[in-house]
Structures are given as C-alpha cells and as structure tokens.
Amino acid sequence: MLTTGQVGRPEDTSSRAAAPARAVGHDIGGRPSLYADALAAAERPDNHIQRVWPMRSPSTGQREALSSAHFPAGHSGSPPTGGAPVEGLQMSQPFTHVPVLRDDVVSLFASVPPGWVVDATVGGGGHSAALLAAHPHLRVVGIDRDPDAVAAARTRLAPFGERALLRQARFDELGTVVASALEDAGARAVLVGALFDLGVSSHQLDAPARGFSYRADAPLDMRMDPTRGVTAAELVNELDEASLVRLFADSGEGRFARRIARAVVAARPIATTGQLAEVVRSAIPAATRRTGGHPARRVFQALRIAVNEELDQLSPALGAALSLLAPGGRCLVLSYHSGEDRLVKAVFADAVTGGCQCPPGLPCQCGAVRQYRLVFRGARRPGADEVAANPRAEAARLRAAERLEQPEDAAGEGASGPVAEDGRGGWQ
C-alpha cells in the first residue's frame, strides 16, 4: 500500500534538488515503491500504456488513500521525469454507471407483485433508479461491496426516499443482508425480484488507481472492496506457474495461457497494470496481437474474477435470491463472461427442473417438483444501437427465471421441458 512515508513529505527546494530519487519514492531499505515502479514503467519508450496523472488537493490528513496521485506543483498534464510530488488527498471522481439492457430489465419487472427487489450489484444505482422511477409498486434494497458505489447510489437514489435501502456487502451475504435491511424497514424477508449485474463497472475501469484497466499504468490492485482481500499483484507474484496457467485458461486464454504464465513468472516482481499488460503483450505472437482486441484483456479479466472470488460467490448468492422470491417474483442476471453465464445457466436449469435427474426428453420419474420457470428461452443481448453507444455492453447476456404461483410435479412436463414465456420449451 502506498503511504505518505514512502514518497516523503516535500521539503525545501534545495533538499529536493539534492535527492531526486526521493521524488519518486523508495521503501525502507532503498527498494523502489509501487509509485516508483509505476513511474519507471510509464517512462519505458516501448510502453503504449496511457500515463495517468490525476490532480489532487492539499493534504489535511496523515495518510494517503491507496488511489491518491502525485502531481508536481506549477504544472499541468504529464509531469517531467523526476518532478517532486506534493502531498494531498485524492480528489473524488463521479461514479459513472451506464445500466446495460436497462429497458429490458425495467420491462421484465413490470409484472411482479408489489414489494422489494434486491439489486445485488447496485453499482452507481442506474438500474435501481430506472426501476423505482418506472414502477411505483417496487422498492429496492441495493447491495455492493465497493464503498464508492454505495456512496454514489445513495446520492442517485436519494429522491426515492424510503423506497431505497443501501448496504455495503458482498452479494454472497445477500440472505443475511436482505433479512436485516427489511427487518429494519418493518417488512418480511420476502422479495418480488432480484437483479445481478455482474462484472466490473465503468467507474472501476475508468478510475486508473483501482488497477482494473490495462489501458493505464497504476498499482495492480483490482479489489472491488479496496479495504480487504488479496490484490492482483499478490496473485501475479505468488501463484506458481501451473496455477497461473489454469487461471488464464479458465478465462478463455487457453491457446497462450502457458506462454503468458511463463512470461509472468520470468518478469516478477510485477507491481503495476502497465508492467503486466506489457508482459502479456510480449508473450503473444505479433500476428495474433493484431486481431481480437487488447492481448491482456482476458488476463486482466481472469485476475479480477479471482481477486474478488466472483464465481465462488455467484452460485450461493443466486440460490439465496431464488429462495427468497415470492410467487410471481423474478430473478434477472446480466453476465459478461462465459464462465459466469455457464454458472447462471446451470443454477437456473436446476431451479426450473426442480433438480430432476431423469434423462432429458423422458417423463420425470424421480419425484422432482418444479418451483420456477424460465421467463424467456436462452439469453437476451444488447442491440446494435446500445452497443454503439456503450461498447462495454457488447458481451452482456441477460437471463431470467420466475417463481411459480404453485409448485408443479416435474413429471407433468413430459418431453417438452420447462416452458418459457415465449411458449417454446427446452434450454439454450
């Protein structure tokens, strides 16, 4: 963690001039600090990563935030090499949240009974604000592990008053958090809806110091809750080569996972996003780098998912949300990664079949009872206009399940499978 002690407090001009190395910061013992490593990476002539130098205000505290920056007095833009840092506190950035498939989400919740919807990944409150504005019969419990997101959502949802409750928590704590929040509101722990908008938010990607983006050089962090858990730097520098290969292969980087892992191990220690992006880029053949987007995209995605234990948390969180649904209530999930989408499909498949273990296409003989149905077959995707306006929406997949008014004997489905809202059976 970058602290004031690492970079040093500014002294008089002669003191700084006599010790230029102090300007970029060193740990005790003379080792370069995270900030010094970031500077060195940014100054490499072959580095194509954007150099990030956000300004900050004068300091009034004794400790800097992890995401604070350094900016030489009297300059704007990129600072000169060796410029002396001035101490200060992080300036706030607006938490931008562009809700993906917003109109679909609003439409799919129109028919649910009056009651509470849990927005398990509230982000900046975009989806929740749209739901509350469109449906006076709904209230929202918003959950997010990112304190910046909770603060932004609180501001955005303030006009809705007591119809919106917010809690900072991981979504695998959903059951406990919903029960506590609704008890405080004098309501039973029953939901008419649940929404999961998985992945990383635009704000997290666009705030370089959070360490999510390969397009800017910053400390390699990637924690959605920056106060707890391991960082991406710890995983990159401590996992053995075989573990890195599995991690990258599971994210879809199967073809070059071993080459990338070997390059990462050889380049250790790696402290910044720019360093990691350059290592990944150099490990992939030049011909391959010319197509398919940034070569580090899947590696960064894999590390983010691992750092935040996203897949480990998703299954229990979905199970808790489905179990809390009232009859007619719906659970919607927006996923952006094939691993997430496969897990959502598996959870929904088990729910809509009642856990039936009989061979597909044959009448159920195991006594399974269905309590859910698919709202529509397969997954909905953003249209061309939405992708053009928000390219990050391109990978989105929306799936939905609804709790039945009355449980059904799975044997009654015959060979048609679970029936979706569009009248077609089967699973895609």
Image (cartoon, rainbow, N blue to C red):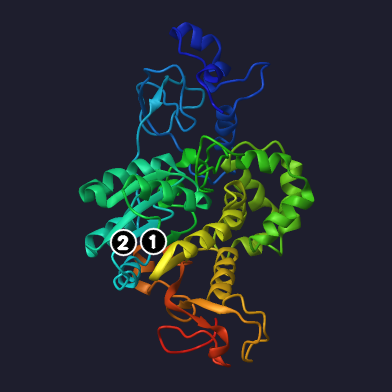
Relative to residue 314, is residue 237 depicted above or below? above
Residue at left offset 41%, top offset 46%: 180
**Quadrant position of residue 273:** top right
The amino acid marked with disc number 1 is Leu
Relative to residue 66, is residue 256 depicted above or below? below
Numbered badge on residue 226: none
Q: Can residue 359 be seen in the rendering of this structure?
A: yes
The amino acid marked with disc number 2 is Gly
Task: State the residue position of label 2.
Answer: 115
For the C terminus, give its image quadrant. Answer: bottom right
Identify which residue, 151 or 222, lies in the foreground: 151
Residue 313, x across and y down, in percent: 57, 54
Residue at left offset 79%, top offset 52%: 242
Whether label 1 touches label 2, CB < 8 Å:
yes
Residue at left offset 35%, top offset 68%: 105
Task: State the residue position of label 1.
Answer: 191
Q: Residues within 10 Å of mark 2 (few under 14, many from 20)?
A: some
